[in-house]
Amino acid sequence: MEDNTENLDNLSNAESAGKADERFETIIGLETHVELSTKTKMFCGCRLSFGEKPNSNTCPVCLGHPGSLPVVNKKAVEYAMKIALALNCRINEYTIFHRKNYFYPDMTKNYQISQFDIPIGVGGFVDVNMGDYVRRVGITRVHMEEDAGKLVHSGTTGRISEADYSIGDFNRAGTPLIEIVTEPEIKSPLEAKQYMITLRNILLYLDVSDCSMEEGSLRCDANISVKLKGSDKLGTRAEIKNLNSFKFIQKALEYEVGRQISLINSGKKVIQQTRHYDDKTQSTKALRSKEEAHDYRYFPDPDLVPININESWIKEVRDSIPELPNQKEQRYNDKFGLSDYDSSLLASDFEISCYFEKALASYDSNAKGICNWLMGDFSAFLNKDQISINESKIKPEHLAGLVKLIDDGKISSKIAKSVFEEMYLKGTDPNEIIKEKGLEQISDEHELESIIKEVINNNPDAVNQYKSGKVKAIGFLVGQVMQKTKGKANPTLVNEIIIKKLS
Ligand code: ADP
Ligand code: MG
Ligand code: ZN
């Protein structure tokens, strides 16, 4: 068989994107790995760690010494159950571990303990909100396994190809890992990205992982194929390994769609293989063909007993599942009267929804007001600085305080914008800012009246226009008052007083 993929490997992005072809349909299935945030590892008592002294959290079990015996971490099983249940899976009441045999220096046992034909959860789904439609993605399986160690390659680049030697750090070896496999039901790179965002959000709600894509606690392999529209036979897939950002997932898959369609259009075949995405070239490259990599000689691990999960254990775990994003969305809708749109935006980001609820806890009379800041100026500032809400200096109670100041008529919404900016930069309490800068809205009628008198005297033209029926002229007069007070006058009150004086 001829491998004719390679000559098309380095298609430029423009070329591949240009080849996107209406006659084809994209099919994607994702395999996501999540490192659990249990205190200890999957089969031993070693502490989980990240960024600590190499090999400081290891023992004979996670180093794979002969004769050492693994023991299942009950907490990890419960976390796996939580995930499976939250993804609407059925829990297998009898579940076992297999050995997946292969050699790699980051895994000293020469096999990984994983699950094979009886995973802990099967047959679930996730609803992915795409804005104008919802894509229901089937979850084939949720299974438990262990992470491998890490190789640290010498040299400045950290690449194996440029290293004289590599050293093994086994702190990560044995970290509980959950794999979540979807049905081939995702229909576009954008849906794939949105699925990952939705899944990450659910996992954060469940509090089972820190889901840090940068640190590798959440990563995904994306399988993708194209087929002619209407055909019920799936095309040959490529698997892109270890995508660790939402952006890369979408970009890598977009590149792949173009590459596969180009191949087919030029009479060639897509071959089943594992590929790697390189963001520098924004393209994928072949790593190995799937067939040769694939015989893992799975067999049940004789060192581990099967796990029996009875109804009452399932119920106990089910009851411990917190409110999930779709339930939260419903509650925001019902309890705070927020629109579907607002509720879904708030609930679809775990950090933002926590922040929102903290803000509400200190001022609960204007959920919509708080929501508007979160979705408007606040989001814009965070986007600009590329930081998350938890990294911002503004405390939730201070945001609530700002909304209260507006609601109480103490500051105008225009002044609020500049107060917000100050809060964002320094993290100061808005009450302090307005006191310190004398920004409090002037609602004192006497104080306003003297300013208004002056404005009326200085602007006879506008006054005459108003008196001769040009109602709009009042806007000019109000504007003058606002200018004189540096935006601090209460505009509604100013309006009332001027009308009274001129009638
Ligand atoms: P493996 O373990 O060899 O990677 P699986 O059968 O477990 O294979 O499938 C892995 C993933 O690939 C699943 O998410 C599945 O939905 C997806 N998949 C399978 N066939 C295709 C295909 N033809 N096109 C796109 N995705 C596919
Ligand atoms: Mg796979
Ligand atoms: Zn250990």
Image (spheres, helix red, strand yellow):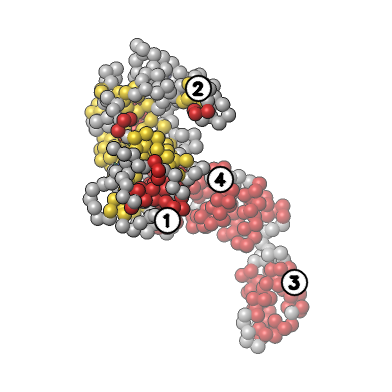
Q: Position of residue 365 (x, y in %)?
A: 50, 55
User: Which residue occupies the foreground of this view, 269 or 336?
Assistant: 269
Earlier residue among tags 2 and 3: 2
Q: Kindly identify the amino acid type of the residue bearing the numbered disc 1.
A: Gly
Q: Against 469, is 162 above or below?
A: above
- Residue placed under numbered mark 3 in the picture: 450
First of labels 4, 3 by sequence position: 4
Of discs 3 and 1, which sits in the foreground?
A: 1
The residue that label 4 is drawn on is 387
Out of 352 and 172, give the one closest to the viewer: 172
Q: How far from the left and from the top, in percent, is residue 398?
A: 59, 49
Q: CA distance from mark 1 to mark 2?
A: 41 Å
Answer with left or right where residue 9 lies relative to residue 421: left
| Marks 3/1: CA–CA distance | 68 Å
Q: Earlier in the sequence, mark 4 or mark 2?
A: 2
Disc number lying in front (1 or 4): 1
Q: Residue 410: horizontal and vertical position, in percent? A: 63, 59
Residue named by callout 2? 166
Q: Quadrant of the N terminus?
A: top left
Give the label on residue 18, or none. 1
Q: Residue at x 37, y 26 (%)?
A: 146
- Looking at numbered disc 3 in the image, what kind of residue is underneath it? Ser
Secondary structure type for disc 3: helix
Which one is earlier in the sequence, the residue at label 1 or at label 4?
1
Q: Quadrant of residue 240?
A: top left
Which three-letter amino acid code belongs to the residue tagged 2?
A: Ser
